[in-house]
Image (spheres, helix red, strand yellow):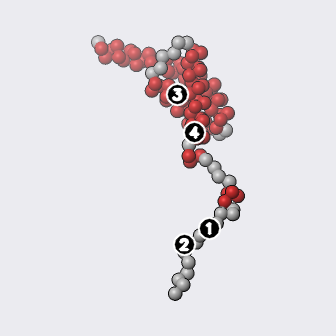
Amino acid sequence: MINLIVGARQGQANKTFEESYERHFDTVYKLCFSYMKNAADTEDMVADVFEKLLKSGTVFNDVEHEKAWLLRTAINRCKDYFKHWWRSRANIDDYADLEIKNPFRENEE
């Protein structure tokens, strides 16, 4: 009996998640695309946002609360992506006048 109740709750959660996904996918995708500027990175961000929704188990007051949570999560995820150290870029011209010491010298004997 307990298994049936747990299974019913999981089924309800999956149905709710699917409804949320269908209801908000386009909005979250457009928002992420405005940050990422390419489809591949956008799809990764959208997947991360909905994965977080699925794992969080957050209960929303209404559809607007759910939408606000998803949009804020999407914005934060996109911003975090660009803050990551490996995403930083340097201009090579900034290093043009860098003094280089050559550790490899010919034998001076």
Mark 1 falls on what kind of element?
loop
From the image, tell me which residue sits under label 1: 100
Residue 103's disc is 2
Kind of residue at disc 2: Pro
Image side of residue 54 versus residue 31, left or right: left
**Quadrant of the rendering where the N terminus is positioned:** top left
Provide residue 88's location: percent of width, then percent of height.
61, 47
Q: Nearer the viewer, residue 64 or 44?
A: 64
| Element assignment for label 2 | loop
Of the residues tagged 4 and 3, which is closer to the observer? 4
Residue lying farthest to the bottom in this orientation: 109
Compare marks 4 and 3 and give the one earlier in the sequence.
Answer: 3
Mark 4 and mark 1 lie on one chain; the one further toward the N terminus is 4
Q: Residue at x 56, y 28 (%)?
A: 73
Q: Answer whether labels 4 and 3 touch (C-beta < 8 Å).
A: no
Please report whichever mark, 3 or 1, sits nearer to the chain's N-terminal start. Answer: 3
Q: Distance between the residues labelled 2 and 3?
A: 52 Å
- Residue carrying label 3: 50
In three-dimensional space, the C-alpha distance between marks 3 and 1, rounded to whole angstroms, equals: 48 Å
**Label located before the other in sequence (2 or 4):** 4
Q: Which secondary structure, mark 4?
A: helix
- Residue holding disc 4: 81
